Image (tube, helix red, strand yellow):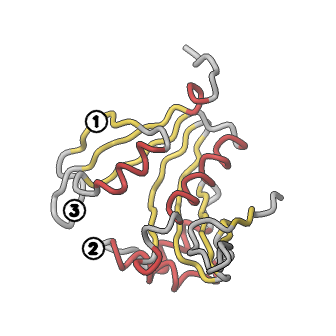
Amino acid sequence: MELPESKRAGAPENETGVHSELTQVAPVSLLWLSRLVEIDSQWNPKHWSERLFEGELNNPAARVRGVFVNELLVGYLIAHFVMDEAHIVSFGIDAKYRRRGFARSLLDDLLRVSRIENIRVLTLQVRASNEAAQRLYRSAGFRSVGIRKHYYSDNSEDAITMRLDLVRMRGETPDV
């Protein structure tokens, strides 16, 4: 089993220039169910129940990763790994911890885990209005490949489908 990596990213610096919060990206356990629901309800109009999160935590195809600040779960990313493809299912950061690099830490962790597990392609859907998330994904190499009209059931908003070809990023020749 791989040990989680610890970093001091995204935390504010104190007067000595050293980050004052310990940040760790690691798998999320069932102990964090209520916190997952709490974070999800801050941004998701049709937020998931504990039962849905429990299903993901018990799903062998799901990778549920969290970013912890001083041992508090402040964000999560759920991706399904099937064969050589992965799909980001849900991704959220606690409102009090946004714009501090934690989403990027989770996304970088997913890319690292994807390479270890020989994932060739990553996909996701993102709300057309969520420009900040789209910028984050583009900065990691994702590109827009389509639009799903009226994808979100809460307001019929369109979703942009994005894709990252990890084979091309690694400089490998794709299978034809």
Tag in front: 3 or 2: 2
Amino acid residing under circle 3: Ser
Kindly identify which residue carries mark 1: 146
Q: Secondary structure at mark 1?
A: strand
Image coordinates of residue 147 in percent, x first then y, are 24, 40
Q: Quadrant of residue 170?
A: top right
Q: Going by the image, does 149 lie left or right of 175?
A: left
Label 2 Cα neighbours within 10 Å, binned few <14 / some 14-19 / many ≥20: few
Give the numbered dot on residue 162: none
Tag in front: 3 or 1: 1
Label 1 Cα neighbours within 10 Å, binned few <14 / some 14-19 / many ≥20: few
Q: Secondary structure at mark 3?
A: loop
Seen at 66% across and 66% down, the residue is 25
Above-or-below relation of 158 to 165: below
| Spatial CA span between label 2 and label 1 | 23 Å
Q: Farthest residue to the top: give it.
A: 176
Give the numbered dot on residue 153: 3
Query: Is 92 in front, or is 138?
Result: 138
Amino acid residing under circle 2: Pro
Seen at 23% across and 51% down, the residue is 128
Image coordinates of residue 91 in percent, x first then y, are 46, 62
Seen at 44% across and 61% down, the residue is 90
Seen at 54% across and 52% down, the residue is 80
Above-or-below relation of 88 to 172: below
Kindly identify which residue carries mark 2: 45
